[in-house]
Amino acid sequence: MLEDTIAAISTPPGEGGIAIIRVSGSDAINKVEAIFKPRQKGRIVSQLKGYQMILGWIVDDKDQPIDECLLAIMRKPHSYTAEDTVEIHCHGGVLAARQCLERVLTLGVREALPGEFTQRAYLNGRLDASQAEAVIEIIRARSKKALNLAMKQLTGYNSQYVHRLEDRLIQVTALIEASIDFPEDVGEPDYQEIAGLLSEVRDELARLLAAGKRAEIYRSGAKVVICGKPNVGKSSLLNWLSGWERAIVTEIPGTTRDIIEEYVNIKGIPVRLIDTAGIRRTEDRVEAIGIKMAQQAISEAELAIFLLDITSGITEEDKEIYQSLNPAKTIIFINKDDLLEKQIDTAQIERLFPGIPVIVGSVREEKGLSELEDIVEAMLLAGQGEPGDLEMLLSTRQQQILQRCMEQIGPITEMLGLVSLDCLAVEINEVIEVMGELTGRSLKAEAMERIFRDFCIGK
Ligand SMILES: Nc1nc2c(ncn2[C@@H]2O[C@H](COP(=O)(O)OP(=O)(O)OP(=O)(O)O)[C@@H](O)[C@H]2O)c(=O)[nH]1
Ligand SMILES: [Mg+2]
């Protein structure tokens, strides 16, 4: 399977400056050479060194140019896949790239499956499983923080960590095996030392899992809803947070009738921000549907920013809306503090909505908004476990592996001294085996396929 040469367009479809077709495999350079006419006479593609580029045309079977292209030559193992690779840089746009790819495919080159280039990098030993997963995290990162964490994973951070844990377990098996092999000289293994090592591994696993849980939010983001009665400034807040006039703002209550969504970045957390129709009793059918959708959005969100209008006081409508909120997931923003008429004081809030963080501010004058962002960040992170020093991104797959290791180690500690040494060694080896799935050392083919299934074509 690894013998064949594969190709795919690696850039996204649509208009752009350039599009890149990646061709990888033992025949990549020869195959592309056969359909390429160098601009400079006498230059031969297959004689180029790695990391050299050459300008010319991809030509059809009648030697007519399909597109003017630049070829980048990479020689194994110094390429993404660790195989011979040619990248054809052609003009952006759908047709040029597609036609060049089709021309390459006439040479008996196979179109690559999603993620197949990365899969080859893995199979050729250039990336381990955790690093391969980091590639997709980098592509999907929606905030700087998520990107940083994914980059860290790509450099092998997660794997190194797990290798250190594996080393400790191997140390345990060595102690046990010494007693099995040389019972007269060694005697019983030092169970206290073994218990110590096992509990260290368990603590580290717990630490890794907690870090993974904390990092989760930077990867998957959160849904935050802005709610409140009509005219309190919900759409104004959405516009401020998204940095452009996303939603219509007017002084007419009931301006927003639909759900308005915008992706924003709050302190490095990718947030799907939802502006809703102001909730009130209404006879208007369209508005009523909007209000129903608002209530639905509130129930689905990780966090609600509940807006009040300082000039209107706390009304029955406000109290009703509060009933539909989860107090543990709510922040109150008392808006329009720039106006002189103030009908809400914080004591009243504390009495009616106890224990909820409150900010008094003004969207118009940009007051209290950075404080609001701080609290949004703090509350979203609070749902992600205790703060800690370790920062690590873990895929769901990696989390499950570490969890399984944790669950297996507990009972082993209980068994020490009670079961035969052979049995103990088997149990420990099983944990090492499970741990190896994280880096791919002991990953089954089917589980490996699953990692790459999520990738896009051309990666
Ligand atoms: N003085 C003052 N006016 C504000 C402030 N924020 C919003 N407004 C005004 O309040 C009015 C309503 O603002 P919107 O953002 O449309 O309010 P909304 O909550 O989305 O209203 P609906 O869509 O009708 O539910 C507009 O005239 C805004 O300019 C503020 O901080 N101070
Ligand atoms: Mg609105």
Image (cartoon, helix red, strand yellow):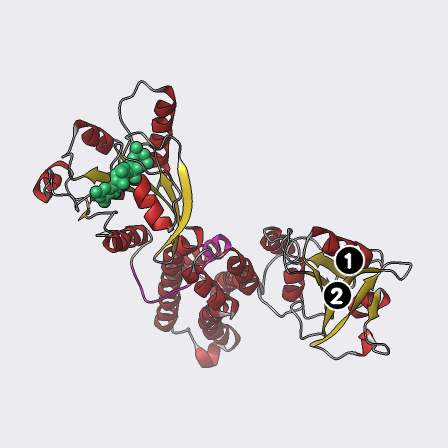
Q: Nearer the viewer, residue 438 or 153?
A: 153
**Cβ at disc 2 under 8 Å from ligand 2:** no
Q: Nearer the viewer, mark 2 or mark 1?
A: 2
Please tell me how many numbered marks the rendered image carries: 2
Q: Is residue 166 above or below residue 210?
A: below
Q: Nearer the viewer, residue 181 or 293?
A: 293
Residue identified by numbered label 2: 69
**Secondary element at tag 1:** helix
Cβ atoms at labels 2 and 1 below 8 Å apart = yes
The main secondary structure of the magenta stretch is: loop
Q: Which amino acid, mark 2?
A: Cys
Q: Is residue 227 visible?
A: no
Instruction: Tell me the residue at 10%/37% (across/down).
Output: 343
Residue 282 covered by magenta stretch: no
Residue found farthest to the left: 347
Residue found farthest to the right: 62
Residue identified by numbered label 1: 100
**Secondary element at tag 2:** strand
Residue found farthest to the top: 283
Quadrant hosting ligand 1: top left
**Left or right of residue 44: residue 139:** left
The mark found on residue 312 in the picture is none
Write the start and end of the magenta stretch as one range.
Answer: 387-399
**Left or right of residue 248: residue 429:** right
Q: Nearer the viewer, residue 241 or 439?
A: 241
